[in-house]
Image: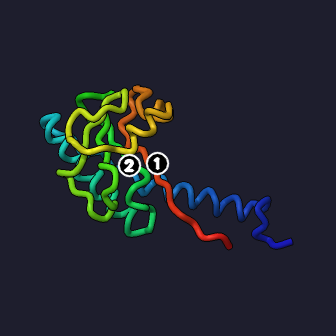
Amino acid sequence: MSPLDACSPIANGLERAKKDAFRDSFKGFKPPSFATLAQERQHRKERLAAGFRIFAEFGFSEGVAGHITARDPELIDHFWVNPLGVHFSRIKVSDLLLVNAKGETVIGDRPTDIEAATAAGLPGFLFAGGDLDAFIVDVMTQTKAR
């Protein structure tokens, strides 16, 4: 048995040190604050569009399936989402659509995969409400059989 076995005091101390270092890296971190809801909305939409491009860079997109949503800061039962059929690598802030708790598009005139999911009764978890300001990801990717 190795002296660094998971049950040993040394291994436990190393794990605790890693956790402490991780926690400490967030000390002093504060989310941005905004003077207006419009500024906060723009900030979230910019981060959302960037998130799509990051997902595309790592291959987590098929272009027509999946979405990343961001809750609107003012209309807390509404989410910003990508249009259906636009590859994640090409999504811009101006492409984003606002959908309500029923999955209906409120701002924008393009379809979303939320509409199809709503028809199937799936997206209730997206609109459960609460105090969580979140980005929610639902991405379908193809994988190769090994």
Q: How is the image coloured?
A: rainbow
Q: Which mark is residue 64?
A: none
Callout 2 secondary element: strand
Which residue is the site of mark 1? Answer: 138
> Residue 132 placed where, x, y %?
39, 33
Which mark is drawn over residue 68? 2
- Residue 89, image x, y percentages: 31, 65
Q: Inspect the image, locate mark 1, and give the three-letter code of the amino acid beneath it.
A: Asp
**Left or right: 20, with 137 as reference point:** right
Residue 100 image point, x, y percent: 31, 30
Residue at screen point 56% across, 56% down: 19
Cα distance between the residues tagged 1 and 2: 6 Å
Q: Is residue 10 above or below residue 31?
A: below
Disc 1 + disc 2, Cβ < 8 Å: yes
Residue drawn at the location 46% of the way across and 35% of the way down: 123
Q: Residue at x 46, y 53 (%)?
A: 139
